[in-house]
Image (cartoon, rainbow, N blue to C red):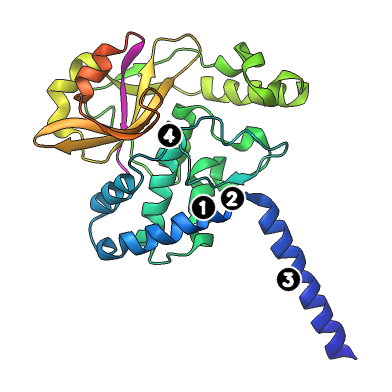
Amino acid sequence: MQQKTIFSFLLFSFFFIGSAFSQEIDFKQQDKVIFEKYVKYIQPFCSKSKELILQKTAEFFLDTPYVGGTLDKNDTEKLVINLRELDCVTFVETVIALANTTASGDLSFDNFASQLQQIRYRNGVIDGYDSRLHYTSDWADNNVEKKILCAMSQQLGGVLETKTIDFMTSHRSSYNALKTDDDMFEKIGKMEDKINERDGFYYLPKDKIKLKATKIPHMAMIAFTTSIKGLDTTHTGFAYKKNGKLIFIHASSTKKKVVIDEKTLSDYCESQKSCTGIMVMPVL
């Protein structure tokens, strides 16, 4: 009788834990199919350098459709895994998470989910919409603290940006999670206050990129800083070196897919009026 009771308790516990875990992750079967394709694709590179693993992982997603807003479709915050469609942020997060999964030696879907959650959320914990790292400078700071990234902009000769970050609360109607939720609006405001209590963030001005191109590592994560009021960055990707040129790989909203941009990083920034430069963050 006692053994039966213990078995029933363990079975219930397993079911409860499994159900709770599944509720936290939003994905489709096709995402698992793509993940399994990636596992086979990356096998020859598992013992190679992290830089090469990052490169091959990013290249795996070439031509993947650009789709924005994929993280904001649920009423409650969940870990969204979407390998079918990417935007500039989810592309960067997915590539780093898959590369870290590969480097760890545990090429399981659960490990990938764990790696992605660790990158996307403050201290790796999902606790509502405000626990997601919405601002890139905040995302970068937290991922440097978690030893996922290395901050490099300052040592490249970058300058300090101390602008007030408040774009989300200043544009409340643009965010579904904030439109009618006063409590969440207040939480995001407090999050912005904490960001603004810091000493700002370093970035490499766009007129210095060409001069520093040889010192920017291949496959370093990059974020494009902006002059737009209240906002830190407008775009993200990875530095990519090809035939001696510093270009970049990213999920492009204009080309509607993941591409290796043939423009040099310097020329791209110069062509974007609101772009002030780049944050440079090699992946550890």
Does the residue at mark 1 contact the one at mark 2 (Cβ under 8 Å)? yes
Residue 202 figure quarter: top left
| Location of residue 178 in the rendering, given as x and y in whole percent from the top left corner | 69, 22
Residue 49 figure quarter: bottom left
Query: Which amino acid type is shown beneath numbered disc 4?
Result: Ala
- Camera-near label (3 vs 1) is 1
- Apparent side of residue 36 relative to residue 188 in the rendered image (left or right): left
- Camera-near label (2 vs 4) is 2
The magenta segment is 274-284
**Mark 1: secondary structure:** helix
**Residue at x 28% of width, y 53% of height:** 53
- At label 1, counting other C-alpha atoms closer than 10 Å, the crowd grade (few under 14, some 14-19, many 20 or more) is some
**Residue at x 37% of width, y 19% of height:** 225
List the residue tagged with mark 2: 27
Work out whether 233 lies above or below 272. Answer: below
List the residue tagged with mark 1: 31
Q: Distance from label 3 to label 4 (Cα)? A: 36 Å
Q: Is residue 67 visible?
A: yes
Query: Which amino acid type is shown beneath numbered disc 1?
Result: Asp
Residue 282 figure quarter: top left
List the residue tagged with mark 4: 140
| Location of residue 51 in the rendering, given as x and y in whole percent from the top left corner | 25, 49
Work out whether 268 lies above or below 14. Answer: above
Q: Distance from label 3 to label 1 (Cα)? A: 25 Å
Q: Nearer the viewer, residue 191 or 46?
A: 46
